[in-house]
Structure formats: structure tokens, C-alpha cells
Amino acid sequence: MVEGIVLIIFFIVGGLAALLALFFFVVAVVRQSKTMFKIGLAVCIVPLSLYGLTYWFYDIHIPSLDKQTEEKYAGTYIMTHGDNDTTKYMGVRLILNSDNTYHLDKNNFTDFAGNGKWKAGATDDGKFEFRDNGNSIKFWASPYNENKLVINENFNDTKRVIFIKE
């Protein structure tokens, strides 16, 4: 939420600074003033800096954090049923590969079993997104402690399955 507020402030300040720079450029052209042109260039630094910070944050920093999370969670997980149940269903595995592909064994819990793509940071609360090969979202998983994933059945919070890393 804080980053959204900061982004709005960046857009407002950057937009106003861009309009101010445009004003100085127009005055510089009309009056043939080098001083106004230099002031316009100096004011241009503000919107360009804010654009650069926004680009860095959303296109470089956040994807690198997501990639680090994906590397931590890549591996083979075994399905358990419920929060307090430590019984491992040996036949049901979820394999998260480091190339962002996954394989989920056939089971009675989800309506999808098979291969697809997964990614970290798909939602604001940090859930992992799982898509099939047709690019349709099949389910989300909530990560815990780098060794556990929780999947809610049919996107419902009442019934869930936990996968524990081998």
C-alpha cells in the first residue's frame, strides 16, 4: 500500500515538474532566452529522476526479489492434509523447477494435475501463481518458511492442503 501511495506522489510531482519544464521551454523559445532554457533543463531532472526510480523499482528490483524467492522455493514438495496432520501422502508430489515450470501429481484435492508454469510475487500478498500450459490460472499457493506451501481448494479458505519440502 505504501508503494502505491509513493507511486501516486511520484506521478503528481513528476507531472507537475514536466509541465513546469515545458513552460520554461516555451518561454525560452518565445523570448529567445538561454537562461530560461537552462532552467527548463534543470527542472527536467525531477521527472526523469522519478521515472528512473519507478522503472528501477518495478522492472529491476521487484523481479530480482521474486527470482530470489523462486530459487529458495524450487524443489520437491510432498502433500499433507491440513495444518496439524503430518501424514505424508507419498504418491502426491509438487515439483517446482528453477526454470519456473512445475509438475503436480494427480490427486483428489485439486481439479488440475499435470505440468505448467509458476511464479512468485503474483499477488500483493506474495502468493505463488500456478498456470497450466494453456496459460489459465489453476491455483495459488501461499509460501511459508521456505519449506511449506499452502493451497486452498477451489480458491476457498475453508479447505486446504499443505505441501512440505522434501
Image: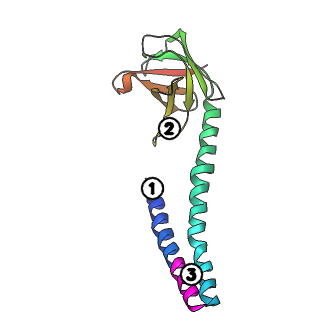
Q: CA distance from mark 1 to mark 2?
A: 16 Å
Task: First in sequence, mark 1 or 3: give its number.
Answer: 1
Give the answer, above or below, for where 21 lies relative to 107.
Answer: below
Residue at label 1? 4
Q: CA distance from mark 1 to mark 3?
A: 31 Å
Give the answer, above or below, for where 103 lies relative to 64.
Answer: above
Assign a secondary structure to mark 2.
loop
Disc 3 + disc 2, Cβ < 8 Å? no
Which of the numbered marks, if any, corresponds to residue 25? 3
Assign a secondary structure to mark 1.
helix
| Image location of residue 64, percent across then percent down | 64, 44
| Image location of residue 126, percent across then percent down | 49, 39
| Image location of residue 14, percent across then percent down | 51, 69
Task: Point out the stretch of residues depicted in magenta.
Answer: 21-32
Would you say 68 lies left or right of 129 here? right
Mark 3 residue crowding within 10 angstroms, few (<14) / some (14–19) / many (20+): many
Magenta part, dominant SS? helix
Q: CA distance from mark 3 to mark 2?
A: 42 Å
- Comparing 32 with 72, the one in front is 32
Q: Amino acid at mark 1?
A: Gly
Give the answer, above or below, for where 33 lies relative to 16.
Answer: below
Residue depth check, mark 3 versus mark 2: number of the one nearer the observer: 3
Q: Which colour style is shown? A: rainbow
- Comparing 121 with 24, the one in front is 24
Which of the numbered marks, if any, corresponds to residue 122? 2
Residue at 49% x, 75% y: name it: 19
Give the answer, above or below, for where 22 lies relative to 152.
Answer: below
| Image location of residue 99, percent across then percent down | 66, 29
Q: Amino acid at mark 2?
A: Ala
